Amino acid sequence: MNDFSSGTQTTVLILFTAIVTLTLLMCVMAGPDRDDLENFYTGYLKLTPLKNGLAIAGDYISAATVLSTTGIVALAGYDGYVLAVSTALSLVLLMFLLAEPLRNAGKFTMGDVLARTAPGPAVRVAACVVTLAATLPFLVVQLSGAGSLLTFILALPHVSGARTVCIVIVGSLMIIYAALGGMRGTALIQMIKIVLLLGTSVLVAALVLHRFDWSPGHLLEAAQHGSGAGPAFLRQGLELGTSTGERLDFIGLQITVVLGVACLPHITMRLYSAQDAPAVRRSMSWAVGTVTTFCLLVIVMGTGAAALVGSRNITAADPQGRTSVLMLSQMLGGAPGSAATTILYSAVAGMVFITLLSSVAGMTLAAASSLAHDLFAHAVRRGRAQPRTEMTVAVWTSVAVGTVAIGLSLLVQDWNVGVLTTLAFCIGASAVAPALTYSLFWRGFTRTGLLATLYGGAACALLLLIFSKAVSGTPVAVFPHADFDLFPMQSTGLVSVPFGYLAGWLGSRLDHRRRAAAAAEHRRLYEESEARLLAAAE
């Protein structure tokens, strides 16, 4: 069903060229000077709440949200609806629980927050390791998916050579954006992306509803028929199954999404660029409103894809349904090759392209910032690095992270890499979320507890996922012909999230018993900053 005319391909290529040219120009103009460290990490704190909120929403809405969630809605119905709602709920949780304390406690990276009461190189190294563990898998997924999606969008032959070229192009642009633009440059790209994303999604959703006389009931009836699942389309179970174990797996996935997505380092990094506590509250209000609106549009677009395209055509193009919104735009435009089809398809393709670019740029910046600031400036140089030197290291680590991500993406481009998205979410929920909540709200949290949470939660999520059904033992696993699935679920949240919190508590209690003086020092450091942390008081 991938019908293209030469005019459509030309229009898409012109649009892509315009997007790249505009965003690169903005990155160069907004980028910091070579020794302007604060501008690189925070953009001088000069983003207004509206701009910062749009940037947060842009970082939060990744290509996985746009494409994979829409595909899950189209193929799994009710399960996709719950996933879209959970995605929005995660940002709401960040807004009410962590956003303001994180802004008050942090400076540039997650390591700054965690080292506030537990200073020392060990904590900085752990923060950097977990940041990379949560960011790199997600980055590889975005780049690997970029190869397949761009070959579909541009109607290129679906061979490894074409995909390789697409991955390298997107990865190279990603490196340039992160290295040259810094926080302000990537924020501007995120703002452009979110405006295009919302505008295009509103148009597509409106056309879907118009096709069914603005009747949600008629749309759902058509979706049940087009999905081939009938009434099961509106019941839980199409994504993971209906047995007791599969229902528990579904619950664990939702816990992982709610706790993990908003705690990913490239999301929390945006909070440090807010001017003050009131500004971060207003920024989060804009971000939550934007993301919630988009998640509702995803539900409409995914349901429309099921109704108009049909699950058989969607899975024939991509088994995970990631091309469903592109195929939907072809159906809504009318006759293949018509002006309306060309315009609508080009708009959706441009939305997908800038989403891919902005998502990978934000993740690269987060990983590079942690390597330069936490690992080099504080763990290696013990806080004595010159701003110009740290800035140079940040630029080159952007190049290094991007190069590694491109290499890994090329290696796994033929795999089912969706499991890497689950891994990133699980590490966010099992290691980052416990570490942040304990560090921000528990006076008795110690260095040993912090290290146990970060390393223990991340290791538990990784080990369980390796031996899960997502990696082996099922036809859709990464290794479908192998069978070492000792853990009977596809998400680790039900086990790894409690393990991460328990590890932090046990580690801190061990410190209190064996090293009372050290535990007392951690408590003193927390109490000294408690007023600023929780109430923004100097």
Image (cartoon, grey):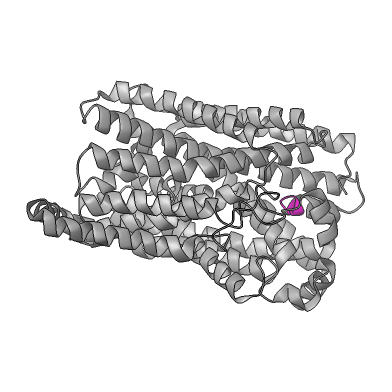
Residue located 53% across and 43% down the image: 137
From the viewer's perspective, tell me whether residue 65 is left or right of residue 327. Answer: left
- Is residue 537 visible to the viewer in this orientation of the structure? no
Nearer the observer, 2 or 532: 2
Q: Which residue lies furthest to the left in this view?
A: 517
From the viewer's perspective, tell me whether residue 511 is left or right of residue 452. Answer: left
From the viewer's perspective, tell me whether residue 328 is left or right of residue 529. Answer: right
Residue located 48% across and 43% down the image: 135
Reply above or below: 396 against 340. above
Residue 15: image quadrant is top right
- Is residue 148 visible to the viewer in this orientation of the structure? yes
Magenta region, mostly helix, strand or loop?
loop
Reply above or below: 106 against 6. below
Reply above or below: 131 against 385. below
x and y, in percent, of residue 45 in the image:
34, 42
Residue located 14% across and 59% down the image: 512
Which residue range is magenta in the image? Answer: 321-325
x and y, in percent, of residue 488 in the image:
57, 63
x and y, in percent, of residue 441 in the image:
25, 62
Nearer the observer, 103 or 441: 441
